[in-house]
Image (spheres, grey):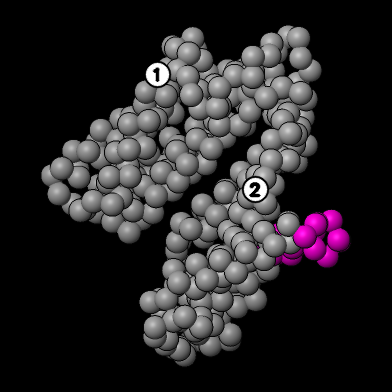
Amino acid sequence: MTLEPLLNASPAIQLHVLAVVPAAVIDGILLLGRKGTPAHRSAGRVWIALMLLAALSSFFIHTIRLWGPFSPIHLLSVLTLVGVFAVVWSARRRDFINHQRAVKSLYFGAIGIAGGFSFLPGRIMHEVVFGSAGASAASVPPTTLATGPAAAVYIVTAAPVWVWPLLIALIALGVSRMRDRVLPVWRLMLLPALLMVAMLLPVLTGGIDASGLSAMAAGLGLGLAAGFMTMRSAVATRLEGNRVLVRGEVISLLALLAIFAFRFAAGAIAAVAPDLMERAGVRELFVAAPVFLASVMAARALAQAGYNPLARKSRRLTLEAEC
């Protein structure tokens, strides 16, 4: 680990990191600590200021240029500003349920997911944590770089065009699941089913070896168990016409973004640092993690429909059709 890449970075990058790091710590304390106290409100104001500073400073960081001086990463900056507004607006309205959802979305999305992208090969934080390979971007082809701006540019520009509309669609889909809604059971299960098919496709096509299959099985089992456990005390509300009342939640958004991040990172590492993917446990991690996340979503959807083998209690409500 070395701070030299950060110390040699532009002022905008330094300011961005100085805002993000304490924001991550403060938000963790806010989420775990007691809510509604004067200390909570004061720390929350500091956190809001840091998040605004982090988002605004990111618009002056142009390490990756895809659309003029901007890149898809700047889309996350825009979403961060929207999220900050949602946090403040919900707090002022004393809508504490949506307030907490917005805070969690910012923490895991803007800090967690976006922070994860900052550790991709070629990014400054990758060099800070893992060190530099010592290679010059000008003398080494991007596909062989482990670090350096050229690798970061290569990762983004070499990605298929459909990747970025897919990311936007996943974000929109995740946000739509943050509100209460009434759905037919088949629609509730559609997205988890599609995700599971996509995750398990290598098994169906024979494109996975024994270690990958073991990692996939572990991710599947742990994901189902975790998903059912998180819904252990939830009450399934079934309506007439085989419909179900689904409460808004932020886990779907976080899971979708995390699946995208793992898949994108796996492709990026395979392109710029293929030797890393061959290390023990690395490939298995990138196989198991998306399956785990998809399985969590599938288990939670089953529990919302009333099928949870780990549920402490269950309730089936049949309401009038007009409800």
Magenta segment includes 204: yes
Which residue shows up at 53% across the image and 88% down it? 240
Report whether residue 59 is seen. Answer: no
> From what the image shows, is residue 198 above or below residue 145?
below
Specify whether 89 is left or right of 289.
left
- N-terminal label among 2 and 1: 1
Which percent across, then down, holds residue 58? Answer: 48, 23
Mark 1 packing: few (<14 Cα in 10 Å), some, or many (20+)?
some
Which percent across, then down, holds residue 242? Answer: 58, 85
Which percent across, then down, holds residue 268? Answer: 70, 35
* Highlighted range, magenta: 194-210
Quarter where residue 143 is shown: top right
* Pointer 2 with pointer 1, Cβ within 8 A: no
Kind of element beneath mark 1: helix
The C terminus sits in image quarter: bottom left
Q: For the residue marked with disc 1, what is the amino acid? A: Leu
Which residue shows up at 56% across the image and 66% down it? 222
Quarter where residue 274 is shown: top right
Which circle marks residue 149 in the picture? none
Kind of element beneath mark 2: loop
Mark 2 packing: few (<14 Cα in 10 Å), some, or many (20+)?
few
Magenta stretch secondary structure, dominant: helix
User: Mark 1 sits on what residue?
Assistant: 15
User: Mark 2 sits on what residue?
Assistant: 281
Specify whether 206 is left or right of 39.
right
Quarter where residue 313 is shown: bottom left
Label 2 and label 1: CA atoms lie apart by 35 Å
